[in-house]
Amino acid sequence: MEQQQQQQPPPLEVRPHPSSSTNTTNTTTSTSTAANKGRGLYATAAFRPGAVIHVFAEPALLLPSLPHLALVCAHCLRPGTPRACTRCRAAYYCDAKCQADAWAAGHARECKALRRRQHQAQQPQQQQLQQQQQKQQPRRRSQSPVSSASASASASASPQSDAVPDQQTAPPPGSAAAKKATSAGEKVAGRSGAELPTPVRALVQALLREDLADALDTLEGHAQHRRELGGAAEWRDMEIMAMAGCAFAGKPVNEKEVRRAVDLLCKIQTNAFHRYDADLGQVGIFLEPTLAMANHSCVPNAMVQFIGRAAVLRAERNIEEGDEVEISYTDYTYPYTMRKEALAQYCFECRCPRCKDNLNVYQVCAANPVDAPCGTSLASDASAAAESHSAVTDEATLALAKSNGESATRLIEDWSKPDMAPNRRIQLRAQYSDCRGLVGGELWAVTPVPQVLTEISIFYAEKRNFAFALAVACLVATRADPYRYVAWFHLVRVKNLFMIAKLLAHTAERSASLSSVMSPPMRANMDQQAQVTLQDIDQAALCQMLLHMILRAAPAGVPAEWDLVEMARDMLEDIESLPGREKEMSLINAWIKDPASETSKIFFDFAVVQQVNALASLGTAALKMDFGIVF
Ligand SMILES: C[S@@+](CC[C@H](N)C(=O)[O-])C[C@H]1O[C@@H](n2cnc3c(N)ncnc32)[C@H](O)[C@@H]1O
């Protein structure tokens, strides 16, 4: 199926935004506005929410990020225990097939280039420092950073020697910018191929592979804008990386090459996707030239999901033929100013409805409903419920969502700094306390409340208090997720369903013994409530149905390769092999066969929606007792 889709041209057309006044291939000078978004992707067919628009199976660039080099396969980016390429030791693969495919796709040249640099990186540090000092002198007289690179290029033996700061652009010694610049130099100084920062590694590939450089040439990079407005230190970082890239790729480090390399870096920065893994975080970068034509909106009608090497473009809302297909470059549930900061790296200001009126998640949910087919959502009436939520109807709550959402998110980021965490429980209490205004206003879906609750659920699970972990996860899945991510198949929602299913597997197999840190009388009271709630629920049936919801949320045609689907299938096999569940199995099978029948709807509402909501209520009680805030 994947191959079939791959052979088909995408049902998409690349063309300039209707109100763009210039040919955007060359718009490198100014910040884009909504009226000048450059080119965009336009649908040549209609798509319903959840439909796969296209599978981009052959990325031009797919690269693990530096911290994940030894944790994911360099060819398919799947996590595991990959083995190193014995020649360069800078690429790891799951198996011989991935290695052979990667070799053919370009690693052959990269491997050679990286090995060529290996012995230089092993030079004694002292010797490198001496070289660096010798080369500093003449460069201080040069006018531009690029020409300074040119002056020293012929003498340059390693990327480190090219990383010497130019005085014209150097910030005052000891300033914050100077420290940053030094660290940028350190990023590449004396490193082996296996230690190259991800953008430099991407650049090396672009310099070695003409197909990739050609693809990048057609893309927007905002080089001039970045140079003029990005700040001298940032620009010098780019040049240092560009020089390192040239040196590693075996190119002359002269003005022309460095300028081209900086341009390529800008294009990579503007057009590459960051690939996230639920457990590992940002595992790598992905770039495909057609997909790179998709513009941004904070109320997007499409989303990208990564499966193995492929990027799957799916409709998030109804898309009609001729509509522009827009995706979100950042998490659209974050507060306005934080989205603005994140989007600044793409050199434009977003003017979507969410940004224009600084709407909260409930307002967006109420105004932009996405229908959920029967048996797919824990809150299929979320948009209707949002319409009457005080975050939509009451001015004071609206203002609270705006101001507290912003301030609490920034406070929580501060608490997440390593030196601010004396103890995990204290940290979580402080973070929950930062959310007290939002929780008091029943604003469960407003960032950072769901994020803090998810951390609390993980904390409970780590403490083996699976009942409370489950209850808090259900709170997120019912009171937050359907409002902040309106599409029932959104990855965050599906992952939270999986978290609930995994926790249910624990609570079902244990007697839900709870160990919280609250006072003994409270604990006794709470344990009892938890026990009663859990006893009332057929945990195996609930788990089984949640797993089937995950299977339904997978993109059609490519489910088998989706990690979540693989894990859900494994768990389902275990549950379905349990003896003595014939009655439950026949009900569940009827629901799977025809989820829209009246009996199935009643069954789903009772066995799933009501049970998860009962657990969510337990979650609010658990939070009050364990993380309660004295007002
Ligand atoms: C990945 S590219 C998308 C394709 C791009 N429009 C082009 O013509 O090459 C990202 C760039 O598109 C522009 N862009 C994307 N979304 C935009 C938006 N909502 N408003 C204004 N410009 C946008 C910005 O210039 C941004 O740096």
Image (cartoon, rainbow, N blue to C red):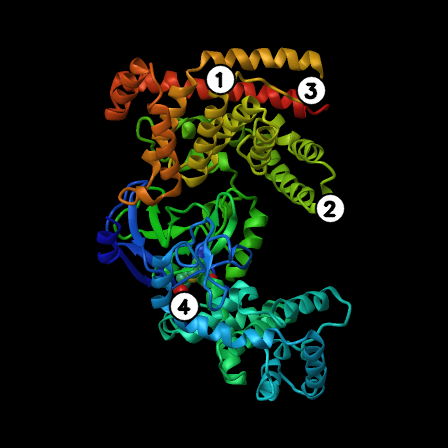
Kindly identify the amino acid type of the residue bearing the numbered disc 4.
His
Q: Quadrant of the C terminus?
A: top right
Mark 2 → mark 4, Cα distance in angstroms: 40 Å
How packed is label 2: few (under 14 Cα within 10 Å), some, or many (20 or more)? few
Disc nearer the start of the sequence (1/4): 4
Residue 522, quarter of the rendered image: top right
Mark 4 vs ligand 1: CB below 8 Å: no
Q: Position of residue 455 (x, y in %)?
A: 59, 35
Mark 2 or 1, which is nearer the eye? 2
Q: Marks 1 and 3: which is nearer the front?
A: 3
Q: Which of 94 and 582 is in front in this view?
A: 94
Q: In this view, does 300 lie above or below 251?
A: above
Q: Can residue 595 be seen in this view?
A: yes
Q: What residue sits right under mark 1 in the picture?
A: 614
Q: Is mark 2 on a helix, strand or loop?
A: helix
What element does badge 1 sit on?
helix
Q: Which of marks 2 and 1 is nearer the N terminus?
A: 2
Q: Which of marks 1 and 4 is in front?
A: 4
Would you identify the image quadrant in which residue 196 lies? bottom right
| Outermost residue to the front | 86
> What residue would you read off at disc 4?
107
Examine the image and state in which quarter residue 187 appears: bottom right
For label 3, the residue is: 518
